[in-house]
């Protein structure tokens, strides 16, 4: 069992289903990932870099792309969601679409492939 599996096993079934779906979409889109931890959170790791974590908080779910630039880079697919630097918050009744999850992953993978993309974007 990995860190994500352990985390999922601790959640109530409804929360587990929502978070597991995000991880399932991520693993299908980027199959060469492994389970690990980053910033104390269970995360998917790709080539030694964290690409995604999803956590349940008291008031919402949060997806962490381990980059403050990723939410701005995928902007349009996140319309209607509470987005902050490095965090995308959503509610169970309004989950992230598979398209949004894949867009976040693509943006994060691009940063891993090209470290210059990690620099702050000029406004």
Image: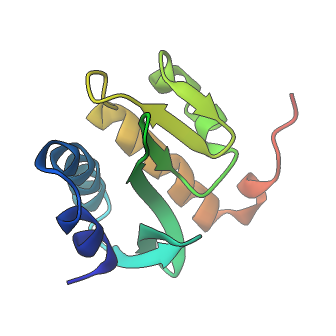
Q: Spot the residue most to the right.
A: 122
Estimate the x, y position of residue 1 in percent, counting from the top left. 20, 84
Q: Residue at x 44, y 51 (%)?
A: 105
Q: Residue at x 31, y 22 (%)?
A: 94
Horizontally, residue 7 falls left or right of residue 85, namely left
Question: How many numbered marks are there?
Answer: 0
Image height of 61 relative to 78, above or below: below
Estimate the x, y position of residue 92 in percent, counting from the top left. 28, 30
Image height of 83 relative to 4, above or below: above
The structure's colour scheme is: rainbow
Viewer-proximal residue among 53 and 9: 9
Q: Residue at x 77, y 59 (%)?
A: 116
Q: Residue at x 43, y 41 (%)?
A: 58
Horizontally, residue 116 falls left or right of residue 48, namely right
* Picture quarter with the C terminus: top right
Estimate the x, y position of residue 80 in percent, counting from the top left. 47, 15
């Amino acid at each position: 069992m990995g860190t994500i599996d352990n985390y999922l096993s601790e959640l109530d079934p409804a929360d587990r289903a929502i978070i597991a779906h995000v991880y399932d979409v991520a693993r299908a889109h980027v199959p060469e990932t492994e389970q690990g931890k980053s910033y104390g959170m269970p995360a998917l790791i790709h080539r030694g870099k964290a690409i995604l974590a999803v956590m349940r908080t008291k008031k919402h779910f949060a997806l962490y792309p381990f980059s403050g630039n990723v939410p701005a880079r995928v902007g349009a697919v996140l319309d209607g969601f509470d987005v902050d630097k490095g965090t995308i918050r959503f509610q169970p009744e309004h989950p992230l679409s598979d398209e949004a999850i894949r867009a976040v992953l693509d943006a994060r993978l691009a940063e891993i492939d090209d470290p210059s993309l990690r620099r702050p974007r000029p406004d």
